[in-house]
Image (spheres, rainbow, N blue to C red):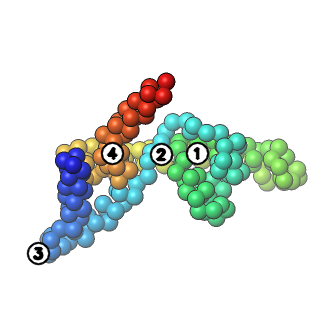
Amino acid sequence: DIYWRGRINFLSETSSVTQAPRRSRLLSLLNSCLKPLFKQIDNMKRISLEEPDFIWSKDYPYCLVGNKDTYDNPYHYLQRAEANEIKNSRSLKSDLHWLNDSINAQLHPSDMPGAEDNNEEAKQISTLKIKWLYACLWCKWFVRTGWYSVCLVIGLPFLGIWWPRPLRKYILSFGNLLEDGENKDATNEDND
């Protein structure tokens, strides 16, 4: 019971920061500036740099993604639940996979299903363009990782207010995750 009260108090304190009283113009101005910032921080996605634990060509719904455009815009091609799963599975390795796939499709259009063999424009992709695509991808991931890191560092002295919502949820539910794991181990031992 004390555990849950502490969580509720923490959540009420974090939401009260963005809802500061409007007694003065300075507080009103501060509130109007911080509210969009906190909303952006709360909606920040998880940063994943590791290899995904699925295979793009075999596992469902990832096998529905056939090209980089479908990967970049899954809501245009897939149902909402499948598109959400694709969107949440983004990582640096996945982005590199689909960039390589896109470059290979442009360099060797005859290897891809449904591609025309006589498309000379698609074959003439320059090495400068390939380097530019890789540089843009790495730059995007460095900026996202840097912004996430800044939020983590700033959030430490402010008791996690600047942390993204998924991270706060993970930290607040960490005790439950350990208890659930211990309960599963205990039931497995009882069954043996």
- Please give the residue where the numbered disc 2 appears in the rendered image: 141
The local secondary structure at tag 1 comes to helix
Give the label, 3 or 2, closer to the camera: 3
Q: Residue at 83% x, 52% y: name it.
A: 115
Task: Return the disc, 3 or 1, that comes first in the chain's sequence.
Answer: 3
Q: CA distance from mark 3 to mark 2?
A: 41 Å
- Please give the residue where the numbered disc 3 appears in the rendered image: 23
Q: Residue at 83% x, 49% y: name it.
A: 113
- Between 80 and 33, the residue placed more toward the observer is 80
Give the label, 4 or 2, closer to the camera: 4
Labels 2 and 1 touching (C-beta < 8 A)? yes
Q: Is residue 14 above or below residue 50?
A: below
Q: Which mark is residue 95?
A: 1
Q: Classify mark 3: residues with Cα within 10 Å, few (<14), some (14-19) or many (20+).
A: few
- Please give the residue where the numbered disc 4 appears in the rendered image: 173
The local secondary structure at tag 2 comes to helix
Labels 4 and 3 touching (C-beta < 8 A)? no
Task: Return the disc, 4 or 3, that comes first in the chain's sequence.
Answer: 3
Say if residue 1 shows up in the picture: yes
Q: Position of residue 150 (x, y in %)?
A: 31, 46
Task: Return the disc, 4 or 2, that comes first in the chain's sequence.
Answer: 2
Q: Is residue 36 left or right of residue 98?
A: left
Q: What amino acid type should be assigned to the residue bearing mark 2?
A: Trp
Residue 103 quadrant: top right
